[in-house]
Amino acid sequence: MQRATIQTLAKAVKAQAPAQVRLLSYTERQARLGRPVSPHVEIYAFPITALSSITNRVTGTALSGGFAAVGALSVIGADVPDEVDIRLTDANKAFTPTTLVHQLTATAAKFSAQEALHYKKNDVWEAYTWAQYHNFNLRFAKALRHIGFEQFDTVSISGFNAPQWFFAFMGGLYLGGAATGIYTTNNAATCQYVLSNSNAKVVVCDDDAQLKKFISIADQLPNLKAIVAWKADLVAAGAAASAVPVYSFESFLELGQDASDASITDDFDKIHPGHCASLIYTSGTTGNPKGVMLSHDNVTFTTATVNSGFPGGAGFFTSTERLVSFLPLSHIAGQLLDIGQQAYYGFHIYFAEPDALKGSLGKTLKEVRPTYLLSVPRVWEKIFEKMSDVGRSTTGLKKSIATWAKSIGSEKSRLSEYGNSGGVPCGFSIANALVLSKVKDALGLDECKAFYSGAAPLTPEVVAYFASLDMPLFEAMGLSETTGISFYNYAHRWKPNSIGPAIAATEARVNADTNELQIRGRHVMMGYLNNPEQTAAAIDADGWLSSGDCARIDADGFGFITGRIKELIITAGGENVPPVLLESAIKEELPIVGHAMAIGDKRKFLTALVSLRVVMDDQGAPTTQLDASVVRILTELGSSATTTADAYADPLVLQHIDDGIKRANLKAASRAQWIQKYKFVPDFSVPNGELTPTLKIKRAVVAKQYAQLIDSLYE
């Protein structure tokens, strides 16, 4: 925001209305309007008695300095009856405010006959066109209205990615409501909290497990009007036991069959860009999740801005792209990409199987051949581990050719980094034909134009490996509070292990005292639902959002995350230690390690809890059976261990781990950051509560769970 221009405007208004003009702080704006306000909006207050003296009432009129009035002047309510407000946004960062509803309906009209949503039925790909997508949204909206759903009400959705997830999400928005996702891994108590906090009127879920969970808490939710299930077999039985009506997806749609389309579409103009569209409940590592309120403008601005940030406006997405939907839609990354970006660009979405992250994703990738892929570090790590296993088993001439080809791939990736030539090294066409293209083809990524990773940092080893395959991993950084993205790398403007430059129309800075990354822009959330104290703590009076990340921004504008503020360990000796760096170093030196958690806050020295990588059961909980890649590595050491108990009893394994942690210590910034002792624990998991749904360690939970074990390290 250009403060000088704003002040010029204020002076101009004062010249026409001599009374004092005041720029409201974020807190004042929130209190004045009775709801959170996007931080990018400037509000000036002045006495209503001066209204008649302002030329043209400045309503909708272009103002000097590149600013324009947004909406009409509005008289503030009874709390401050003598003032009006002017709301301004920077026209130099122009993207005409719109809503997801208007955006999607325009795209549906433009590509009506084109296939939009692809899904598997009896192991055969089928699809809904854009016209059918829009029609299902209308039908769902009619059914919602039939049961009493009104503007600003909320529909909650819990289930694996599917067309019905989209229909329920957009159907709620078509009525001017908001939608919120609930992780399928959430227990009943957390689900009850989210539904109560968001005042949900309808909950939509997929299978019997989810249905039973919501039926069990329905009697604690007085505002809940219906439960809708799209895959459950127990709908009839559940209806008898439920405190609210239970419907199959098809029977729910039938409720609105007598209503006309116009009964929904005629009210679209009542939906405004500043209204809340999505509630993203942050999984959090302590306490109840917070409901991040994202406006229509937050989402539509972000989708447009990401693409427009490319040099020359080339962008990345077109309507012909193919993307696989597998990241949880309850998380902002999946929601922004699969629903928001698709609504803007009109590309194809292919829904992966529910067990995608347990193994079936590879099959889907080979069938779909996506043109872009965004994933979390763990998926890239799994590919890296499997490919590394293949590499270790290769010998002779074949291994020599592969090693040479990867060196050429590394050089091509290096040349594509920011500031380099972008050229193609000598021998690349041969290396690509013999090795690199075959690897991509085997992974189903031969038509993929860019490979993205987000949610957590990648290790340098993984980044370097994919670079050697001519598959540079572009890291991105964002928060639920910034509509999913604030920084990102892209072709010829990337640096390894960087989060990239900030997206267009975003301001970013690093607090000189705390090294915390702060962000300001139209993509910053409206606030936390029903939580003004936390909102005020997150966003200051000037609209700067505190990210919680320690960072640095280099001379080229590229950001680098160095740790998390809340995760910083401050030892008894006053040493500030970012634990993620130590933990990543351990995992890099010891591929057999599943998780490592550094400990040492207010302690004399650092210790760690370490787990071995194991096979997970069908629910995603750890077993005692070592992962095949771990067994292979241990076999090379001369160990016959196949279980965690075997490994912990084998001196060869214990020495291997000890040596690896010593090597990791050498990467630390100082000796005070060395891990002095460690203990083994079972591998962390979401079902057991040690990891969030986005696979971040719940440090407080783990510390409490293993308090006695941790204390024993300091005895």
Image (tube, helix red, strand yellow):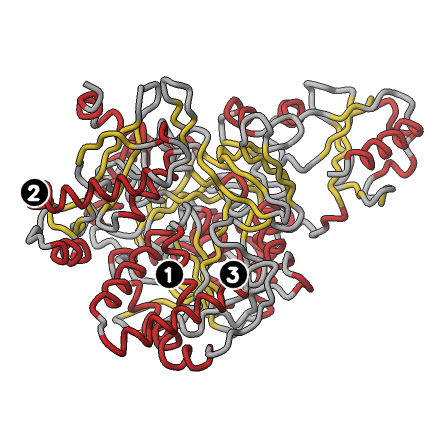
Is residue 573 visible to the viewer in this orientation of the structure? yes
Mark 2: few/some/many CA within 10 Å (<14, 14-19, 20+): few
The quadrant of the rendering that contains the C terminus is: top left
The answer for how far apart the CA atoms under marks 1 and 3 are is 31 Å
The residue where tag 2 is placed is 645
CB-based contact (under 8 Å), mark 1 and mark 3:
no
Q: Residue at x 76, y 47 (%)?
A: 91
Secondary element at tag 3: helix
* Mark 1 or mark 3: whose residue is earlier in sequence: 3
Between disc 2 and disc 3, whose residue precedes?
A: 3
Mark closer to the observer (1, 2): 1
Quadrant where the N terminus sits is top right
> Relative to 422, is 583 on the left or the right?
left
* Left or right relative to 61: residue 596: left
**Above or below, 260 relative to 654:** below
Q: Identify the residue under disc 1.
A: 465
Judged left or right of residue 548, residue 712 is: left
Give the image location of residue 130, x and y in percent.
50, 67
Q: Give the x, y percent position of residue 569.
A: 38, 26
Q: Position of residue 589 (x, y in %)?
A: 29, 48
Going by the numbered disc 1, the residue's amino acid type is Tyr
**Residue 506 location, quadrant:** top right
Asked if the residue under mark 2 is in contact with the one under mark 1, i.e. CB atoms within 8 Å, the reply is no
Q: What is the CA distance from the residue labelled 1 to the residue labelled 2?
A: 32 Å
The mark closer to the camera, 1 or 3, is 1
Residue 426 on image: x %, y %: 50, 77
Badge 2 amino acid: Ala
Q: Amino acid at mark 3?
A: Gln
To which residue does mark 3 refer?
Answer: 342
Which structural element holds mark 2? helix
- Give the SS element for disc 1: helix
